[in-house]
Every structure is written in structure tokens, then in C-alpha cells.
Image (cartoon, rainbow, N blue to C red):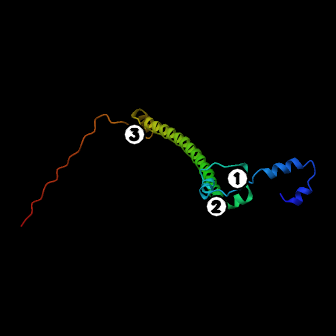
């Protein structure tokens, strides 16, 4: 310390000033470039809370804006895809219920048609319009046509 400063020191500060004069000055060296590179490396642990606050601060957010926009886009795509999948699942469920109902209706109509076209059901309906079933089995009528010979 300078001599002017020592003269103006009060008695309470005297022991502190004496200790400061006796201790050698410690030179603060800048960290080696390798240490700085490892400190800024993506996998490096943060040295202090100051580094964490600096990354979260306004400047940190502005520096990482493209990455944050990319993350936002991914989130929007994820939410959109999830909503689309849910609506598609609901649509598939409603279509499968409708298909089951239509299949039951088809089977019901087909069974009624088979019943209505059975021989036991057709005979009374045909008798109402004047038709009756055959007493003899059906037979084939064959007609022979004489072949004319050509005259030359």
C-alpha cells in the first residue's frame, strides 16, 4: 500500500492493513483456452448459478431463439398429431359401430328373404293369384326339325 494511505489509517484498520501488506499479491491468471472451451462445451457442467441465470436470461433466450422456435414447432406438430390421432380413433370407432349395425341389418333382411322365398311360403301366395304347384315333375319338350337337302 502507499505511504499516504498508511498515514490516514485509523487504529481499528491498522491490523488489517498490516496483514494486507505482509501477504504477497496473488496474480489472477486468465483460464487457459482449453478450460474455456470445456466450460462452454455442451456436455460440461455449469460452474455456478451465474452461468445458469445467464443461459436463462434475456440474452440467452435471444441467442437460442432459432432452437426455441424449432422446439415450439415440434410441440405444435406433436399436439396436432395427437389430436388428429384421437379424432381418427373416434371416427374408426363410430364407423365400426355403424358397420356392425349394417351387417346385422343385412343378415336380418337376408334371413327374411330366404324365409319368404321358401316353397312353403310361396304356395299360398301363388294360390292367391290363381297359380298352383305342378302335380307332375317338369319335363323337356324336344322338337325334331326335318333337315332339307340342298338341290344342286
Quarter of the figure with the C terminus: bottom left
Residue pointed to by mark 2: 66
* Camera-side residue of 14 and 45: 14
**Are there few (<14), some (14-19), or many (20+) residues within 10 Å of tag 3?**
few
- Quote the CA–CA distance across marks 2 and 3: 88 Å
**Are there few (<14), some (14-19), or many (20+) residues within 10 Å of tag 2?**
few
Q: Is residue 66 left or right of residue 140?
A: right
**Mark 2 in CB contact with mark 1 (< 8 angstroms):** no
**Are there few (<14), some (14-19), or many (20+) residues within 10 Å of tag 1?**
some
- Quote the CA–CA distance across marks 2 and 1: 20 Å
Q: x and y percent of residue 73 in the render? A: 63, 57
* Camera-side residue of 75 and 144: 75
Q: x and y percent of residue 139 in the render? A: 25, 40
**Mark 2 in CB contact with mark 3 (< 8 angstroms):** no
Q: Check the image and report above or below for 75 versus 104.
A: below
Per the rendering, the mark at residue 131 is 3
Residue, x 81% and y 51% (percent of image)? 20
Quarter of the figure with the N terminus: bottom right
- Mark nearest the camera among 3 and 1 is 1
Q: Reading the chain from its start, which is encountered first: label 3 or label 1?
A: 1
- Quote the CA–CA distance across marks 3 and 1: 103 Å
- Mark nearest the camera among 2 and 3 is 2
Q: Check disc 3 and report its element: helix, strand or loop.
A: loop
Q: Reading the chain from its start, which is encountered first: label 2 or label 3?
A: 2
Residue pointed to by mark 1: 51
Q: x and y percent of residue 147 in the render? A: 13, 56
Q: Is residue 24 left or right of residue 76?
A: right
* Camera-side residue of 110 and 79: 79
Q: Check the image and report above or below for 68 versus 152.
A: above
Q: Reading the chain from its start, which is encountered first: label 2 or label 1?
A: 1
Amino acid at each position: 500500500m502507499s505511504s499516504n494511505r498508511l498515514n490516514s489509517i485509523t487504529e481499528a484498520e491498522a491490523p488489517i492493513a498490516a496483514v494486507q501488506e505482509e501477504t504477497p499479491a496473488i496474480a489472477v491468471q486468465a483460464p487457459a483456452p482449453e478450460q474455456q472451451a470445456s466450460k462452454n462445451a455442451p456436455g460440461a457442467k455449469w460452474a455456478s448459478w451465474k452461468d445458469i441465470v445467464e443461459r436463462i436470461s434475456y440474452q440467452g433466450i435471444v441467442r437460442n431463439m432459432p432452437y426455441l422456435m424449432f422446439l415450439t414447432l415440434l410441440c405444435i406438430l406433436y399436439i396436432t398429431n395427437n389430436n388428429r390421432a384421437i379424432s381418427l380413433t373416434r371416427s374408426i370407432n363410430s364407423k365400426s359401430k355403424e358397420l356392425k349395425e349394417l351387417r346385422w341389418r343385412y343378415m336380418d333382411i337376408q334371413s327374411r328373404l330366404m324365409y319368404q322365398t321358401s316353397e312353403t311360403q310361396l304356395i299360398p301366395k301363388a294360390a292367391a293369384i290363381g297359380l298352383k304347384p305342378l302335380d307332375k315333375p317338369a319335363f323337356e319338350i324336344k322338337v325334331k326339325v326335318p333337315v332339307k337337302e340342298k338341290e344342286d
